[in-house]
Image (spheres, rainbow, N blue to C red):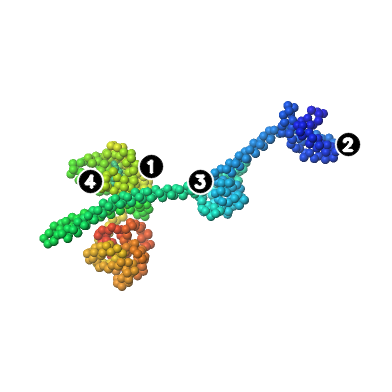
Amino acid sequence: MLGKPLTLIIPERYHEYMQGGLERVVSTGVFDLGGISFEFTGLRKSGEEFPAEMSFATWKSRHEVFFSCIVRDISERKRADKALQQEKEFTRTIIETADVIIIALDLEDKVILFNRKAEEVTGYCRDEVLGKELLKTIPMRMDREAFAKMTQEITSGAAVSPYHQFITTKSGEEKIIFTRGTQLKDTEGRVIGVLETGVDVTEQRSMETKLLQAEKLRDLGELAGGVAHDFNNVLAAILGRAQLLRMHLEEFAGSERRKAYHELKQGLEVIERAAADGAETVRRIQEFARIRPDDKDAVAVDINKVVAQALDLTRGRWKDEAELKGIYFTIVKQLSDVPPILGSPAELREVLTNLINNSLDAMPGGGTIRVETFKEHTHVCLRLTDTGSGMPPHVVERIFDPFFTTKGPQSTGLGMSVSYGIITRHQGTITVESKDGSGTVFVIRFPLKEIEKVSQEEPPQAVKKTETETAAILIIDDEEDVRELLRDILTMHGHEVAAARDGRQGLEILASRAFDMVFTDLGMPGMSGWEVATEVKKIAPEVAVALITGWGINLDKDDMEKSSVNHILNKPFTVDDILRLVREALTLKKMKE
Ligand SMILES: Nc1ncnc2c1ncn2[C@@H]1O[C@H](COP(=O)(O)OP(=O)(O)OP(=O)(O)O)[C@@H](O)[C@H]1O
Ligand SMILES: [Mg+2]
């Protein structure tokens, strides 16, 4: 190579350019070949071309210009450069075409990357957000402080779980983004910000809500169907009997009145029973629909005591009646000394009673019921086993559905669903295991709780009787039947009664004379029962107000104290319910005096 022209290692097509350049250097003495070093295409002896770099050094003597050059093969460097370029392009393509929102923030929460999906979802283009604080550009439900705290947690390496972020798009729409933040690091591994990757779940959320709604409606339909069915039975009995009685009364006269009296009594008994059954169905539906746990009323409950009480309540079925029919049941109790749980004794008794009744139904020829209580880790458990008919899988599957029954029209099919609701409200679980023909096992588990602070006593069930006293009572109800029924009940028991058909009329009467108590209906045209109560208290604060309602309202102590209502009377009520309320009102009044 020495002594040969430089063009030997340059492909022929560049010779002219090279030559021209060299000549210019020689003639002007100015080196202008594009820098001290430059890249060019080299030529190997084999004829193969390769990327090369040439570095020059020139010097001049008086008449001549010399230059030396170093030629380097830079194929390797070129390959690495290309690979890097390719990788960058890949990343860019991934970020830009990904169907996820990708936003990178620096340590001051300023946006340094905002991909196409982010633009699409938010409606903002990157020029509007890059370099700005994200929250200042795109409004979110999270405030700045909380957002900054979260990004700080992410950058410091804390595990922040993905969360739902509610953002407002440029067009003012609210969208829900399910997003996850991770640390953003530079090549040296230093944390330089946060990378948020998120998906728009707005549509999915609204679909879920719709589905839930549809499911609710279906359940409601099922519920309504069941209620209608049961009520038709009850109403048929009431209506039929009432008509019959009227006909009899018209028929019988004079000497036959005694017979008529007997029939009347029998008929009334059926009506009473049917109405009570109807009321019971409503109570169970209300029980089933009640979601809010009445924590304030919860007490420490000894589950063993509940077992004993439920067995007592059902004794008629598994002992007395059964033995009369020559059927024998064995009750095995294996009760361990378990800690009390927090809840409502009455509700838990209902669960146990439902389970025992079902087991008895499943053993028409007699059998064994075993009740065990035990502690298991952090739970108090109750296991109830019977040797009854058991259930095929398709029954097991539907056992907790409201109105599901295999027992025909005389059963409501609410026992297990009500029980399920009660257990869930007590934060417990219930499992069932059963095979067709080989008995059933239920296991109920309640979480162990700190219950020292809670009262250990069951609340008193009934109010003590005070000596019979006469009370002055005002009835306000727009429904004549209810109003007259109340009037009859109260006057029959010696109370003085005035009645009004709406709130306005009631308040007028109240202003004209003194009363001990007001019974007011809740839903009335003009003024609601709550409003009547408030007005009554303004006129006469010492008067007790009882609100009559068909809505199954259960107010806890605090809510009651806040309202002007002293008592709630749920429809349908019994004579005893009314008289108890009057007694309570009189006792309270006396205590205050
Ligand atoms: N221990 C059991 N053995 C066999 N089948 C049972 C048992 N417990 C429940 N079942 C089945 O589950 C169904 C639903 O029970 P659930 O207590 O909800 O309603 P029901 O007993 O039919 O009616 P209700 O309790 O309202 O009078 C029953 O009809 C019965 O088929
Ligand atoms: Mg049942």
Of residues 88 and 448, the one nearer the viewer is 88
Q: Which residue is mark 4?
A: 317
Answer few, some or many: residues within 10 Å of disc 1's Cα (few below 14, many 20 plus, some between 14 and 19). few
Marks 4 and 2, how far apart at CA: 132 Å
Disc number at residue 63?
Answer: 2
Amino acid tagged 1: His
Residue at the extreme top? 46
Q: Of the two numbered discs 4 and 2 on the same chain, state the one appearing first in sequence.
A: 2
From this view, report whether residue 460 is shown above or below residue 13: below
Marks 4 and 3, how far apart at CA: 56 Å
Answer few, some or many: residues within 10 Å of disc 4's Cα (few below 14, many 20 plus, some between 14 and 19). some
Residue drawn at x 32%, y 58% is 550
Q: Select label 1 or label 4 by which is in front.
A: 4
From this view, report whether residue 348 is shown above or below residue 41: below
Q: Which residue is mark 1?
A: 377
Q: Which residue is mark 3?
A: 162
Q: Of the two numbered discs 4 and 3 on the same chain, state the one appearing first in sequence.
A: 3
Residue drawn at x 81%, y 39% is 31
